[in-house]
Amino acid sequence: MSYKVLSLFSGCGGLDLGFRGGGCFLDKNFSKNNFQIIWSNDIDKNACQTYHHYFNHPIVCGDIREILANNHTSIFNNPIPLESDIVLGGFPCQDFSHSGKRRGFDSKRGTLYQAMSDTIVKTKPKVFLAENVKGLLTLNDGAAIKQIAQDFEEIGYHVSYKLLLTADFGVPQKRERVIIIGTRKGLLPKFDFDTLSNQNTKWMSVQQAIGDLESKNEGDVDNHFWSKAKKNKGQGNNAIKKENPAPTMRAEHHGNIEFHWNKKRRLSAREAARIQSFPDDLFFYPSTSSAYKQIGNAVPPVFAWNLAKAIEVFIDKNINKENQYVARVNL
């Protein structure tokens, strides 16, 4: 059985890649999942260009709030489907980040989860998954995440959330992200994060992930170009340690992406993509600075694949159990 997926804030497609499955990262194959992306959206034109060239279906480029307000008018020729099984959304996180201004709900972007909520009300999925930064847990002394969870509960979903470290799931990066999973009341029980097993007990070092690129000349490999920003004070001006997973790849670094361990240059966009577990055949358009931003904004596909696999098993187990119960009752 294939589950229909509606993807919001899709960016260059990290979550979508993981849910679709069937890809390869560092010679390791990841099985195809029973999820079909039927509709996707992002506001960033460059990310949409990258997504459109890689996936075999279109992406609607525009503000989700405008799309919801004009869903069945001529302003958009690809309206949101009226039903889905899964809604995905890594809603914009900069305003919740510890490294940002932490404006949270006081900004327009900070309330974009409400657009996700509106989409869920319209399409009534079995499950939704939202992703955000660690800072969401501490914003307003924890009141922000409680408010978000309450809002989703009120539209008919059990809500679970947990802070996860991507290095625990085969990603060569110490990226911490809050994962929020909602399951439709009356259809599914609450999702238990204890069922999400770590893929690896041993972390992957950044040298394992990008060591082969160190000797490559700039431009020898797609997107293997790097920022020429000189070393200065502040975040992103230290060299990564090759024996460890890399630090979080950031979207907004204004060229100050971390230096390679050889200290001769900064990380290239392709190296950042590898650190995020993107396959090498995904090309990021149209420039290096845009590639850095798209990569930093994305959910690592290998991490997403693990989430997708756990959700697929969860739905299959519980939906089948419900169907078996109904069948017994009707005997």
Image (cartoon, rainbow, N blue to C red):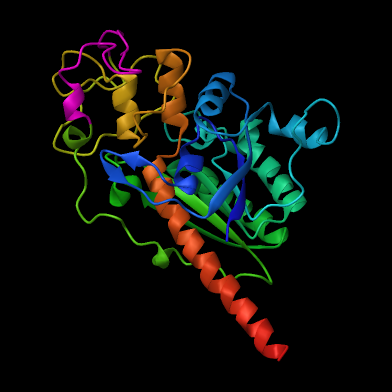
Residue 155 point in image, percent of width and height: 72, 58
Q: Name the magenta segment's main secondary structure.
A: loop
User: Is 272 left, or right, of 239 in this rendering?
Assistant: right
User: Is 249 left, or right, of 307 in this rendering?
Assistant: left
Is 228 one of the magenta-colored residues? yes
Q: Residue at x 39, y 20 (%)?
A: 253
Q: Residue at x 64, y 56 (%)?
A: 85
The image shows residue 262, relative to residue 240, as above or below, that is above
Residue 80 point in image, percent of width and height: 74, 40
Residue 289 point in image, percent of width and height: 42, 14
Image mark count = 0
Q: 201 or 136, which lies in front?
A: 201
Q: 133 or 191, which lies in front?
A: 191
Q: Is residue 191 visible?
A: no
- Which quadrant does the N terminus fall into? bottom right
* The quadrant where residue 181 appears: bottom right
* The quadrant where residue 271 appears: top left
Residue 288 point in image, percent of width and height: 40, 14
Q: Residue at x 61, y 70 (%)?
A: 188
The image shows residue 203, relative to residue 254, as above or below, that is below
Which residues fall within the magenta stretch? 210-232
- Which quadrant does the C terminus fall into? bottom right
The image shows residue 116, relative to residue 246, as above or below, that is below
